[in-house]
């Protein structure tokens, strides 16, 4: 499993809920998964800590197989989609 780095540019802070929010992208077996994540924290929390917590939340959701996510199969250079053989 590969995780796209969560950068400060991709994190938003919701002051109403006191939550850091981001869409975290995971790639496994040629399929890309997007998990909308939110973690509670004060506005003064370092963004590196928020990024770590958001990544951990996405990893946990992916491992459990539950939770809201989107999934996309990668496209080959010639425009054809490919899937793992059964």
Image: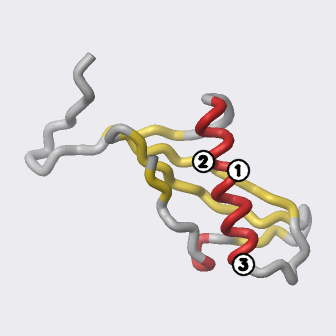
Q: Are marks 3 and 2 in contact (CB under 8 Å)?
A: no
Give left or right: position of 53 versus 45. left
Mark 2 and mark 1 residues within 8 Å of each other at the beta carbon: yes
Quadrant in the picture for residue 20: bottom right
Alpha carbon of mark 3 to alpha carbon of mark 2: how far?
18 Å
The disc at residue 47 is: 3
Percent from the top left, x then y, of residue 75? 23, 44
Query: SS for tag 3?
Result: helix
In the picture, the quarter occupied by the C terminus is top left
Q: Secondary structure at mark 2?
A: strand
- Circles 1 and 3: CB atoms closer than 8 Å: no
> Residue, x 52% and y 67% (percent of image)?
5
Instruction: Give the mark toward the camera: 3 or 2.
Output: 3
Residue at label 2? Answer: 35
Quadrant of residue 15 within the rendered picture: bottom right
Per the image, the residue denoted by label 1 is 57
């Amino acid at each position: 499993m590969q995780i796209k780095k969560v950068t400060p540019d991709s994190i938003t802070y919701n002051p109403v809920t006191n939550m850091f929010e981001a869409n975290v992208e995971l790639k496994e077996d040629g399929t890309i998964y997007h998990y909308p994540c939110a973690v509670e924290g004060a506005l003064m929390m370092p963004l590196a800590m928020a990024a770590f917590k958001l990544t951990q939340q996405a990893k946990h959701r992916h491992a459990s197989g539950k939770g809201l996510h989107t999934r996309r199969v990668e496209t080959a250079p010639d425009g054809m989609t490919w899937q793992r053989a059964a």
